[in-house]
Amino acid sequence: MTTPSPGFDRRALMKAGLFGASAFALPPLLTACSPKSSDGNGGSSDGPIRVGVISPLSGAWTVYGKAHSAGFELAVQEINEAGGTLGREWELVIADSKTEPQIVTEQANRLVREEQVDFLAGTFSSAERNAAGPVATQADKLLLYPTFYEGQSQEFYPGVCNPNIFMFGPEPSEQVWPHMEYMVEKHGGKFFMIGSDYVWPRETNRLTKQKLEELGGSAVGEVYIPFNTPQYGSVISQIKRSGADVVFLSLTGSDTVNFRRQFAAAGMKDNFVVWTVDDEEAATSGIGPDATEGDYVSFDYFWSIDTPNNEKFRAKVKEQHPDVIMNTVGVAMYNAAHMTAMAIEEAGEVSTEGIRSALEGMTFDGAPQGSITMRAEDHQAVLPSYLVQAQPNWTGPDDMFKVVQSVDSVEPATAQCDNLPLSEA
Amino acid sequence: MERIISLGLEIGSATLILALVSMGLALIFGLVRVINMGHGAMLALGAYLAWTLTGNGVPFPLAVVLATVGVGLVGLVFEVLVIRHFYEHPFETLLISWGFYLVVTELIKIIWGSTLKNIRNPIPGTFSIGEAGIGRYEAVVCLVSLVLLLGTGFVLYRTSVGLKVRAMIQNREMALMLGVNAPRMYRSVFVAGAAMAGLAGALIAPMFSIEPDMGTLWLVRSFFAVIVGGLGAIVGGTLVGSALIGGGTVLFALVSKQVFAQTVVFALAVLALRFRPVGLLGRR
């Protein structure tokens, strides 16, 4: 097995890939193939604005990867059709994270040093973001991070609490807390928590338990599953014996699919309510209607939410990326690109410092979920929050979920960072 | 009592499903000494064929049969074109079958895309014994696995074909001299192993996530099951190996965390190999 030498070959390949993509789907992006500006300075004031996008295009989380990059591409296409930013077109360099943190480090370095991008967008899991954090800090480039995540706590610096990173996805105080009262009142306060064994599920569960105890409930079980576990017989009988009311789920990737299919096949759905904070439209598609019916999911965005912006957004996705299952992460990428474009216009230049101070406190009314704001002090997005329920015999994302409860705008809990506001850290 | 029945069911199911998934690997490895790294892709192919067929209105049992035949045919083509030239070179077959895995996985991505697929549970509902219970479909798959193991055992130990095959394992040259048609035997074994992978892939498809890389989930576990069980001890070895890897995890998960249970089982497997390099039931 040979790999192309990391220099010219891979870059040529990437350009060829982009050429293909732009030739077929994104005519305005054809400039992506033009030779890059020769001065070699990312902050140059002429030539295109170069963005490095790191998406999980292969590996365990491929299922989320398409929406991830498509959301950003869609926004960039809109930006370029409107004449670019400061009169400059955007040019994308898309890199595959292969869902592995060490590849993220490699790719982030390559994008910054060789491709000389102006800023970075993407990475998917918290582990990937934490791998990109040090690169962003060293190179003093911004990273726009789209995924629902565990919140910020100083011990995970520089992956979080980093003045160079902006979070466009929801954290537990936005994704989970607003719906806990409803769930506890309706279904009971005994939660069985099952998650994949890494930082996001562990932190999410810690914060969920904290709120649960305030509401008089408790966690009757807490289990973490190593990645790529096929069989769940023992966990399922543990849940059966636990006396739980709600199974609170933060498994990811194929593990969540395998667990939920086996959970349903074991007849557990009659006795337990499932609430997942991972399974957006793509993962739910993989689990299928029989095993998801009646289960709860919560996020800041769902394909089926009824807002004027979302209607337009859906039409565009269907036209440009008909094979992509759009989700919260893709939408966060979309918002990230648009808000950054606005920030560049406001700053009047493409610089880390300029974009950062303009992004801080910025409100964006064009988000598919409505109006969202980037909070200045800790770079966390103020987002809406939806609790939905999977419908019987759904056939696709259009009729998959029905909104049970929604909150228009949730202020996330303040980040647990040593120095706030972040920009003065 | 119910706890014990429930535990028995879990261990039985974990063991039999792993045995089902590992059987094709064990057969090819045990009889023709090819370490078939393509096994995972064959599993995935079986699952995807079953998905396409059921999606086009073919009843699930028929879809399973067709997926088995389909993957068997792919195995046949692969054997005729490539593998048969390399039986004497185990290391090369390892690399070649790994190449097969990569190619087939990419082909699956091209043909079916990388979004997750699912097959509706063909037999919903559960069998319950008091508080203990098992999904009906899961029970059926376990039963099929058992039948497959017994059937393979019967063919190997009670028929003249089996006699020739076993002669080949014990003393290849002697068997050849006594007129065993080796090329045909090798081909049949390889195709049977591929078909078993297809069968397993199609059968587990309603219980698991169908995705291009789904085979990797099983490859490591299957390898351990086959090697710990014992080289050449095809039926018993696979069953014992699967019980150690699959059932062992269930047992350890009773008293420890999942992460620990899965780790301990693999550590035990390594330990077992340290003291019995030919596997628990293996023989030279």
Image (cartoon, coloured by chain):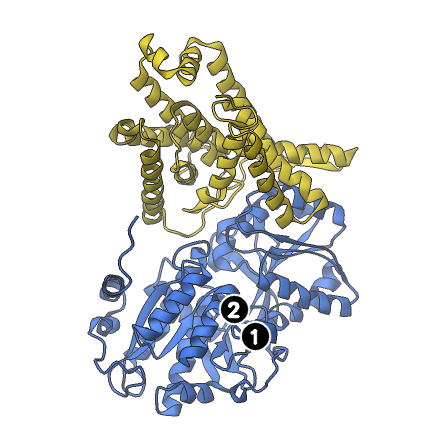
Q: Secondary structure at mark 1?
A: strand
Q: Quadrant of the C terminus of chain A?
A: bottom right
The quarter of the picture where residue A42 lies is bottom left
Classify residue A245 as left or right of residue A159. Answer: right
Classify residue B267 as left or right of residue A193. Answer: left
Classify residue B244 as left or right of residue A214. Answer: left
Q: Position of residue A98 (x, y in %)?
A: 40, 58
Q: How far, Cα to Cα, is label 1 from label 2?
A: 8 Å
Query: Looking at the image, is B200 positioned above or below residue A273?
Result: above
Circle 2 residue: A301
Query: Looking at the image, is B116 positioned above or below residue A298?
Result: above
Q: Position of residue A153 (x, y in %)?
A: 61, 74
Q: Residues within 10 Å of mark 2 (few under 14, many from 20)?
A: many
Circle 1 residue: A384
Residue name at image x 56 percent, y 74 percent: A384
Colour-to-chain, blue: A
Count of number-bearing discs: 2
Residue name at image x 34 percent, y 14 percent: B173
Disc 2 chain ID? A
Q: Check contact, mark 1 vs mark 2: CB within 8 A.
A: yes
Observer-nearest of B2 and A123: A123
**Residue A171, can we see it?**
yes
Colour-to-chain, yellow: B
Residue name at image x 42 percent, y 52 percent: B115
Residue name at image x 34 percent, y 21 percent: B186
Query: Looking at the image, is A351 positioned above or below residue A27?
Result: below
The quarter of the picture where residue B166 lies is top left
The quarter of the picture where residue A91 lies is bottom left
